[in-house]
Amino acid sequence: MNIFDGAIVLIALLLTGITMLPKLRNNLWWRATVTPLASIIGSGFLVVAPLLASVAGSYAVIAMMMIVALAYAVGHVIRFNILNAEVLEASHNGPTGLSAFARVSNVSLTVAYVISIAFYIRLLASFALSLTPLAGDFTEDILATIILAGIGLVGWIRGLKGLEIVETISVSIKLSIIVALLVALFAYNLGTGQWTADLPHADADSLMRLRMLGGMLLVVQGFETSRYLGAAYPAEMRSRTMLWAQLSSGVIYLLFVALIVPVLLYLPAGQADETAIIGISGQVAWVLPILLVFAALMSQLSAGIADTVGAGGLVAEETDRRVSEQLAYPVLIAFSIALIWMFNIFEVIAIASRTFAFYYMMEAVIAFIVAREVLTGHKRVVQLVWFASLAIILASVVVFAVPAE
């Protein structure tokens, strides 16, 4: 290990130590931020770069900006609903159709969570075995099944708090390694003097590429988990911590894609699989493949747990607490286990992206209904136009999104 590799490891260790301090781990604001942040970053911060390169080539950063911008626009809808729709939904005296749309929205999100949990943990298994002789679809499915069963067991025995402990630790480790990765990529690009690259892209027209980008919405999904943590955190805190999670994760995604573009030249032609980034990271520093495997494990574990928490909260909410989160967790996990044996990982990404897009579309419709009820004047007109336009865009994703392979 040379000085550069040692510096990368030292940065990761120091940041992990800071984020693991009890004062930070026990901070209510940080804990409310952890769940959406874990899900947003964990959903694809490593797999997104090879996918974007295959779809957009040298314009990968612009494509990432488009995805982040769409996610932020949807985040505005969710924050509006946290502050305005939740009270009306709970009172059961809201505008006509609100309860029905809310029910459809929640059911669709529960389905989306089950799919995304399967994706996260299957991706975790791929990264865990990527540097071993055991790598392969069957063994990765077996490992994913074991991990999912463990999450379901912890949720059943320890409930939300037990899952949050695991989630907080994994997020702290993951963020520390991500910062170390960004520093390493910056130093590498500075040393080579190369900040851009002429990357090949998919042999497809602009419309098909947009459809592929729509199929990648899952990689920035996760912020909506704040909407379903009402039993633990007040609405204003959930809205503000969700905004912070979106802004910080958006910066991380854009920096990562921008800095990794020159390194993507080492990506073998046609290879955009879920572990491609591990192999080419060795061009930057010897230690990076090892750190990235560990970061990937933490990313997918924390994201899987975050969506398990969100799904459990949804089930409890929809059943008026007749079914507790603790009982919901193992049942939801069982469905996720079934999915990993039925579909490959890129099919799961596209299916989950379209399912989340449908949920976000329903939330935009709910926001439209509530805005008509609670807003007045110019602000009412602007928000109604915005929510209606976003619902149409998301409907297009539902109908036209395709896998980016």
Image (cartoon, helix red, strand yellow):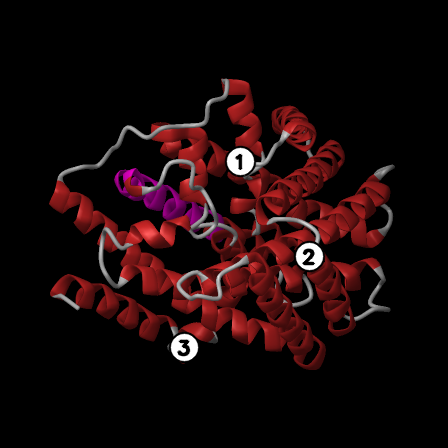
The kind of residue tagged 2 is: Trp
Q: Which residues are magenta?
A: 245-265
Task: Tell which of 72 and 194 is nearer to you.
Answer: 194
Q: CA distance from mark 3 to mark 1?
A: 42 Å
Q: Quadrant of the N terminus?
A: bottom left
Q: Is residue 47 rendered to the left or right of residue 109? A: left
Task: Tell which of 222 and 206 is nearer to you.
Answer: 206
User: x and y percent of residue 14 in the render?
Assistant: 27, 71
Q: Quadrant of residue 323?
A: bottom right
State whether residue 288 is above or below residue 67. Answer: below
Which mark is first along the chain, 3 or 2? Answer: 3
User: x and y percent of residue 322 in the render?
Assistant: 86, 69
Verify CB contact (< 8 Å) between mark 2 and mark 3. no
In front: label 3 or label 1: 1
Task: Tell which of 254 and 118 is nearer to you.
Answer: 118
Q: CA distance from mark 2 to mark 1?
A: 20 Å
Element at label 2: loop
The kind of residue tagged 1 is: Ala
**Residue picked out by circle 1:** 404
Residue 341 disc label: 2
**Residue picked out by circle 3:** 23
In front: label 2 or label 3: 2
Element at label 1: loop
